[in-house]
Each structure stands twice: as C-alpha cells, then as structure tokens.
Amino acid sequence: MDLVQTIRRLASTQYQDIVALRRHIHAHPELSFEEKETAALVARELEYLGIDVQPHVAGHGVVGLLKGDNISPNSPTIALRADMDALPIHEENEVDYRSANPGVMHACGHDVHTSSLLGTARILSQLKSELAGTIKFIFQPAEEKFPGGASLMIKAGVLEHPHVDAIIGQHVQPYIEHGKVGIRSGMYMASADEIYLTVRGKGGHAAHPATFIDPVTATAQILVALQQVVSRSDPRIPSVLSFGKIIAEGATNVIPDQVYVEGTFRTMDEPWRAEAHLRIERIIKHTAEAFGCVAELNLVKGYPVLFNDEAVTARTKAVISSYVGEENVQELDLWMAAEDFAYYTHEAPGCFYRLGTRNEARGIVHGLHTSRFDIEESALEVSTGLMAWVAINELRAQASRS
C-alpha cells in the first residue's frame, strides 16, 4: 500500500472519533482568551499520542512537537496551525451538539480546525518514519479578538526552538462544496484596521447657526473626503474604507457638541497601508479644522495582509491535487476579510488554504459568523488526511533544500 492510501486508511479509521471530538468542542465553546478547557483537551490528546506538549503559551495556547525517527540537527521543522476560540453568537441550530454555553458559538469553524489538527496529529504520530524533520502543532487562542493570539504566540517564541521553516493553515469555507479545497498564491486576505473618530464642535439651537460650530456638517464632509483615499489611489491595490457607526446625539432643532464615528480600512499592500493611514489622518485633521472643529482620531492597526508564499503554495497545491484530485481544487478569489494567521506569514513562508464544508442537499449552506453555521462532517475525513499528506511532503521539500 502506498503512502497516500495508508493516510486515507488512517483518516477513515479515526473519522468517527474526530467527529465526536469536533461535536464535543462545538458543544462547549469558549470565547477568545478564555479557551481553558479546550486547551486542556488538546494537551491531553497530544500527550496520549506521545507528542511533547508545551501548554499555556501566550495564555491558553498549546504547542506539540513531533520528531521524525531519523532526523539530524539540520532537519527542517514545519508548523501546522489551528485556532480554538469561539464567537459571541447565540446558536440557532437544532442539533445534538448545539452549544451548551448560551451566547457563545463556534460559528467560524474553529472547532473543526482544532479537531482536524488533532486528527492529523494522530495520523502523523503513526508515520514518524516518513517524517524528514519535525512537526510543530500550534493550537492558538484568540484568533477572533485583537491583538490576535498569533501575534502573542509569535512573541512567546512559537516559531523558534526549533525554528519553523514553513507554516500551513487550514480554514473551513462554507461557500465551497465538501470534498473540494480552495487555494491562492500571493496576497489572499486583507489587513484590517479600526477607525475611531470623535469630531468636536460647539452645540446649540439649530435655528441659530451663528451661535454654534456644527460637528455634524464637518463629519459629513470628512466622510465624503475620506472616500478619496481609495478612489484616488492605485486601482491595482484592493482597498476598502467603510464606516458603519455614526452617533450624533442631537435632535431636529439641536446641534450636538460632538459626533462619534467608527469604521474600518482594509487593503492588500503593507506599504500602501502605511501611506493610507497618513492620508486618513491628514484629511480628518484639516477638514475638521476647516469647519472650526477639532478631530480626535484613534486608528488601531489590526491584522496585517495575509500573503501565501508562492513556492510553498505551489507545492501545497500540487500535493492537495494529488490527494483530492485536480478537479476538486479551485482557485480562490481575493478575500477582504482578515485572519491573524497573517502574522505567521510575515515571519515564515506560509500557506493558508480553504476546506470545503458545504452540502446544499442537507441545507448546510450558512455563512461564517452566523447563528446557523454548520459543516458537512465528512469534510473531517478529508481534512485530517490532507494536512498529514501536505505536512509530510513539505517536510521532504524543506529537507531537500537544506
């Protein structure tokens, strides 16, 4: 039996166990920075497999280390990453494994990522003779909440001791049919920055414009002017500037003292991102001044651009094709959402791909971050074996370069 068939057999053998594990995690979700029980479960599972475990990394992060049977000091290390946190969403699915924690739900598939990577760990722990180096399993807290568990784990040294030569991440995608996988080389997901703005003027009676300084009109002009940041920038760089919250607590005849605004800026290019921040600051400051107001801006720099290394992604795509069939691999579009896996891709060559979990025949069609999100669980048999196959081949590729 060749190695691919061996991996498929192992994935099939453990499939029901991984489904049960996923359902348990789904029923017991924990919010960002609160993943205590999930992390304890992960540590127990890894220890049972004989994998070296480092718990409590950057809070509730867990790192497992699995070494091949015949490695040298120069053998490569690759990392496989899963995130563990849930979202503050009340689940509306009527299933046996529905969330037992009211108002908290695995609505982004992190229960899938965690259980799937544990399944991959099970497979690889039985194939140590095939490992041309070391596998580092990264179970990360707090992907959903700034500053992101990835940034904290990197600061804690997760990409060192041993040094990580490449990192692979897998994320569910409910818009792709189960059995299929999506991948994209180069820039894939956007940076995400948060804009908090207060424009201060002098309130008064709306019938007496000479007696007040109108922050509402000033804010309106600021928002219109800010659209030039994107519309008059390089059209080859995807960018989005949106404002979703405006509070001006006046009335039909009352001009308020201040207006509060919240928004987001997203792009796919880090140098342009830095320049855009300066443009946003200048436009806000000078437009407010032109209307006699004062602007207070808090521009919070969030997750960076997620860039899939071209060489690692090309190898990963070929390996995925050999496992699921070329006809089941599709090219992903740019995705203007953000993901803290991006931090890893700025420190090590990485590839972040998408696992199809949709099943229209069963009504499993709801999007991420919604109260009805669920997955076609047969995707777990694909995901566990697929990542094991990707890991083995990427280790071989890294070893051949050293």
Image (cartoon, rainbow, N blue to C red):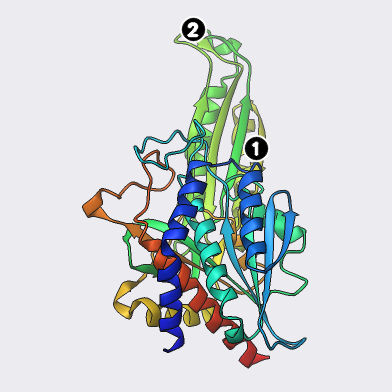
Crowd rating for badge 1 (residues with CA inside 10 Å; few <14, some 14–19, many 20+): some
Q: Residue sitting at 53 percent across and 20 percent down?
A: 248
Quarter residue 33 falls in? top right
Give coordinates of residue 87: x percent, y percent.
Answer: 52, 41
Is residue 108 found left or right of 324 in the rendered image? right
Secondary structure of residue under mark 1 = helix
> Which SS class for mark 2?
loop
Residue in front for this viewpoint, 318 or 63: 63
Of labels 1 and 2, earlier in sequence is 2
Residue 184 visible (yes or no): no
> For the residue carrying disc 2, how many other residues have a C-alpha within 10 Å: few (<14), some (14-19), or many (20+)?
few
**Residue in the image at 57% along x and 59% along y:** 82
Whether 179 is drawn above or below 302: the answer is below
Name above or below for residue 401 compared with residue 17.
Answer: below
Q: Say which of 301 and 10 sits in front.
A: 10
Q: Amino acid at mark 2?
A: Ala
Q: Check whether the beta carbons of the residues at disc 1 and disc 2 lie within 8 A of each other.
A: no
Name the residue at 47% across, 55% down. 112
Position of the N terminus by quadrant: bottom left
Q: Residue 207, labelled with which disc?
A: 2
Look at mark 1 in the image and give the residue it sits on.
Answer: 285
Q: Position of residue 54 (x, y in %)?
A: 74, 61
Which circle, 1 or 2, is nearer the viewer?
1
Image check: 322 left or right of 347? left
| Camera-side residue of 352 and 185 | 352
